[in-house]
Image (spheres, rainbow, N blue to C red):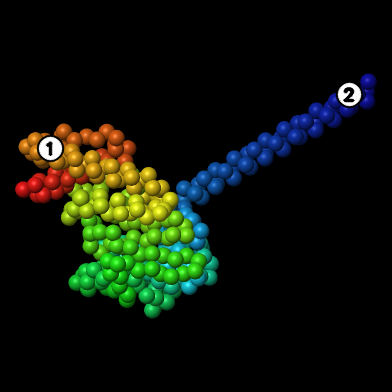
Amino acid sequence: MKRATQENVLVNWKYRQLVIVAGLLMLMLGLSVNLSAKAEQGSDSKSEWFKVADNTYVFRYKFYFTLFVKTENGIVAFDPLSNEAAEQYVKAIREAVPGAKLSKIIYTHWHTDHSTGAKILRREFGRNIPIIAHENTLARLKKLTDSDVPLPTKTVTNDGLVLNDSSNPIELKYLGYAHTNTMLIAYLPKQNLVFGVDFVNHDSMGWRDLPGVDIDELILMQKRLMKLDFKTITFGHGRPGGRQVVSRQINYYKTLLKEATSAVKKGLSEDEAVKSTVLEKYKNWENYDNWFTMNVRGAYRFVKEKLE
């Protein structure tokens, strides 16, 4: 009886010890999770990079995105965005492809919110790294004379250019002039991937009141894009998507144009057109609350000018 009692006491003591240890472990685990969460919250979330396909990476800075590709001759980096972004771009390239050299910088178009920052990449990887852009980009940047935007050293015509590479060929293509007549897109056939900036976005309204945009040509550019054999598209704004994203953009602009044309033909004023055009289907798109009515105004003015 005494022996049984002692065993019971020992079992109970061991049980209590296990409960205490388990409690301490749970406390330590909880503390560790909390510390990790705080570390993540305190980290710089303005920029990131991620792999999107074989040897192909996306770099994000705030709400801008760009692309860099590992080839046999080194990294091909698109749109450096800005001097501040380019500092983080350098880190992203070195983290994604340690020890790699930078072989080329490509401007998709002349707008300085995408083309600034190349001097930072050159400072880190080599001052004589070639910069490729459409010939119209060179003409625009020459007039701009911005010391933060190095001029292209090689230009591309409307016929495009193929950067031959046995591992990752890159085709630079000119699809039209809707956003600007300096626009190049990148087509990577081995990855079934395209990179398009500004004239197509991921489920988002067009920028403000579509200043200077030929909407007919914009739709044509997007349709020309769809003729390419790709499965993935990366954007200058928004995370990567598939072919259906481009199809949705085409349908949006076609619907917007149809509504604007109807409003003009009915004799509605611009304000009346804004009030009568809602397009519930797109309410969940990025910037709907801020820019949709402005998109309607831009489309209305485009149609009205075209019909007059």
Q: Quadrant of residue 126?
A: bottom left
Above or below, 142 against 176 in this view is: below
> Nearer the observer, disc 2 or disc 1?
1
Q: Nearer the viewer, residue 285 or 264?
A: 264
Residue at the extreme bottom: 128
Q: Quadrant of residue 5?
A: top right
Q: Which residue is mark 1?
A: 263
56 left or right, relative to 217 = right
User: Helix, strand or loop at disc 1?
Assistant: helix
Query: What's the residue at 44%, 55% (across, down)?
Result: 192
Q: Which residue is mark 2?
A: 5
Query: What's the residue at 42%, 60% (across, down)?
Result: 188
Query: What's the residue at 16%, 47% (across, down)?
Result: 298
Q: Nearer the viewer, residue 46 or 168?
A: 168
Q: Percent x, y for residue 28?
A: 63, 42
User: Helix, strand or loop at disc 2?
Assistant: helix
Which amino acid type is shown beneath numbered disc 2? Thr
